[in-house]
Image: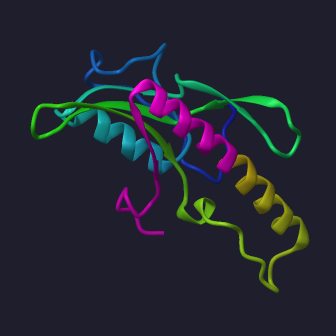
């Protein structure tokens, strides 16, 4: 696994192995993903969970080609009424879920990068939402706000 030193990364060792669906141990690519993995592994209402094992094709509007979107996580969750709910979950900084804003302090290169990422991500999320509806899932994007993490 190639590591980015800016983020907390590593291999997570699930305690509740029967709940984790996937080959080998999941890889977390941020402290936020690690927090989510721990929550999913230890939460008694999570019946099953996995990381990057649902792949959804999407068309990237920047090149018009079909690419593969590896959704961060999925969970099967039992609610208070005993109903089973399935979720596809993407974990992103809230800043990356909003249209980029040009400021006088940002370099042109940064603005272009943020715009390309936003266009690509929205195409991924649209495809994930459509896939989720067809397969009986709900697609969610979790940010530091939902994970109760302060920046």
Q: Residue at x 35, y 21 (%)?
A: 20
Q: Is residue 33 left or right of residue 105?
A: left
Q: How is the image coloured?
A: rainbow
Question: Was residue 134 drawn as part of the magenta stretch in this picture?
Answer: yes
- Nearer to us in this view, 75 or 12: 75
Q: Residue at the bottom extreme?
A: 104
Q: Nearer the viewer, residue 8 or 76?
A: 76
Q: Position of residue 50 (x, y in %)?
A: 42, 26
For the N terminus, which image quadrant?
Answer: top right
Residue 144 vertical position relative to residue 15 in the rendered view, above or below: below
Query: Which x, y percent locates residue 124?
Result: 65, 41
- Examine the rendered structure and indicate whether residue 143 appears above or below residue 120: below
Camera-side residue: 95 or 65?
A: 65
Q: Which residue lies at the image location 80% right of the left edge and 83% below the top edge?
A: 105
Picture coordinates of residue 99, whole percent (x, y):
67, 66
Quarter holding residue 59: top right
State the image quarter where residue 66 is shown. Answer: top right
* Magenta stretch in the rendered image: 122-151
User: Residue 137: within the magenta?
Assistant: yes
Residue 149 versus residue 92 in the image, above or below: below
Give the percent coordinates (x, y) of residue 54: 53, 24
Q: Residue at x 35, y 62 (%)?
A: 148
Residue drawn at (82%, 59%) of the image? 113
How many numbered callouts?
Answer: 0
């Amino acid at each position: 696994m190639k590591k980015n030193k800016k983020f907390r990364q590593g291999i997570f060792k699930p305690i509740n192995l029967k709940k984790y669906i996937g080959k080998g141990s999941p890889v977390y690519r941020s402290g936020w993903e690690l927090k989510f993995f721990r929550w999913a592994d230890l939460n008694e209402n999570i019946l099953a969970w996995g990381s990057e094992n649902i792949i959804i094709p999407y068309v990237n509007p920047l090149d018009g080609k079909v690419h593969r979107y590896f959704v961060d996580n999925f969970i099967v969750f039992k609610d208070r009424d005993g109903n089973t709910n399935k979720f596809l979950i993407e974990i992103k900084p809230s800043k990356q879920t909003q249209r980029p804003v040009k400021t006088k302090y940002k370099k042109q290169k940064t603005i272009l990068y943020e715009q390309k990422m936003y266009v690509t991500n929205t195409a991924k999320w649209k495809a994930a939402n459509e896939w989720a509806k067809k397969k009986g899932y709900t697609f969610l994007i979790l940010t530091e706000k939902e994970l109760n993490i302060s920046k």
